[in-house]
Image (cartoon, helix red, strand yellow):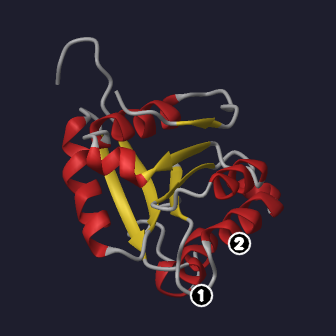
Amino acid sequence: MLAGRRYFAQNVLVVEDNGDDADLLRIAAGAVPEAVSFHIVPDGEMALAYLKGEGQYADRHVHPFPDLVLLDITLPGMNGLDVLAWIRQHPEFGSLQVFVWTDSGDPAMLERALKAGANRFVPKSVAFVRGGLAGLMRGISQAIRSSTANAPTSVKSN
């Protein structure tokens, strides 16, 4: 441990149906000094079960409640906007930060996600193509550590 730095585990629920994208996130976790633990589910229905701690996700030692949700918009079955709406309709999840990410370049999608209550929007193309995964990981780390609610913003790659 470096002097003056606080290290802590961060639990991120990743709702992502593309296994390659999920693997890249795990690799990018090495870019931040804090331990980031990803809990990955492939669709919206499983995300809700995880958040509620139901079924296979009932053991919170194995499946801890997340500090942040990284939510793909284009999912099979229940899409990411529906998951986001469900989260925001439940007061017990009011402080849960949700970063929406997608490979869709549709500006209307961005607008809908932010209006639905996303804390940040992360275009996958920026994260993957421009090497912004390290920045994404730093943004996740900072968002979790932040004690104040963030206004909806867009994550930009350096």
| Image mark for residue 85 | none
Question: Which amino acid type corresponds to the residue marked 1 in the rendered image?
Answer: Gly
- Residue at disc 1, secondary structure: loop
61 or 131: which is nearer to us?
131
| Horizontal side, residue 154 vs residue 18: left or right | right
The structure residue drawn at horizontal position 75% and vertical position 68%, both measured from the top left corner, is 86
53 or 23: which is nearer to us?
23
The structure residue drawn at horizontal position 25% and vertical position 41%, both measured from the top left corner, is 131
Whether residue 50 is situated above or below residue 153 in the rendered picture? below
C-alpha separation, residue under disc 2 versus residue under disc 1: 10 Å
Q: Which residue is mark 1?
A: 77
44 or 21: which is nearer to us?
21
- Asked if residue 66 shows in the view, the reply is no
Find residue 135 and report its horizontal and vertical position in percent.
34, 34
Whether residue 154 is situated above or below residue 73 in the rendered picture? above
The residue most toward the top is: 4
Find residue 66 and report its horizontal and vertical position in percent.
51, 56
134 or 26: which is nearer to us?
134
| Horizontal side, residue 111 vs residue 47: left or right | right
Q: Label 2 neighbourhood size at 10 Å, few (<14), some (14-19), many (20+)?
A: some
Q: Which residue is mark 2?
A: 82
Q: Quadrant of the N terminus?
A: top left
Find residue 148 and report its horizontal and vertical position in percent.
66, 27
Whether residue 51 is situated above or below residue 145 in the rendered picture? below
The structure residue drawn at horizontal position 47% and vertical position 85%, both measured from the top left corner, is 56
Mark 2 or mark 1, earlier in chain: 1
Question: Which amino acid type corresponds to the residue marked 2 in the rendered image?
Answer: Asp
- Asked if residue 89 shows in the view, the reply is yes
The residue most toward the front is: 106
